[in-house]
């Protein structure tokens, strides 16, 4: 089986060893079993997170479809947004 060397803080290392041996026994391989399980869970969680993210190209395509009716360019829209924020800020003050 391939080897993977990692560096942990002393506190985390001791806690991991303690929990590994409590779970998998005090024999040979208990720390490796716990590490393999932890890494599998971590990679599966990351895979789920990646699948939930919409690819950037798809996001742009979706936005273009939503904004087809808008005639102003991006600079004009930024100016309008600034005016709206200023009006809202003034309304909160009074």
Image (spheres, rainbow, N blue to C red):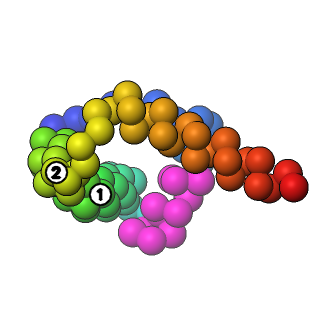
Q: Closer to the camera, 26 or 66?
A: 66
Chain part drawn in magenta: 15-25
Query: Horizontally, is 59 left or right of 24 in the view?
Result: left
Quadrant position of the C terminus in the picture: bottom right
Query: Horizontally, is 8 left or right of 44 in the view?
Result: right
Give the residue displayed 73% in from the left and 48% down from the top. 89
Give the residue displayed 52% in from the left and 63% down from the top. 19
Magenta-drawn stretch contains 24: yes
SS assignment for the magenta stretch, majority: helix
Residue that lies at the very extreme toward the right in this rendered image: 94
Q: Closer to the camera, 22 or 66?
A: 66
Q: Which mark is residue 49?
A: 1
Give the residue displayed 62% in from the left and 37% down from the top. 10
Residue that lies at the very extreme toward the front in this rendered image: 71
Classify mark 1: residues with Cα within 10 Å, few (<14), some (14-19) or many (20+): few
* SS for callout 1: helix
């Amino acid at each position: 089986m391939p080897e993977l060397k990692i560096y942990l803080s002393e506190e985390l290392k001791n806690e991991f060893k303690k929990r590994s041996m409590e779970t998998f026994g005090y024999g040979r391989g208990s720390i490796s079993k716990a590490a393999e399980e932890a890494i599998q869970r971590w990679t599966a969680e990351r895979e789920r997170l990646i699948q939930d993210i919409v690819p950037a190209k798809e996001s742009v395509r979706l936005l273009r479809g939503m904004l087809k009716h808008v005639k102003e360019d991006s600079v004009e829209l930024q100016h309008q947004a600034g005016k709206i924020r200023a009006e809202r800020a003034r309304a909160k003050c009074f």
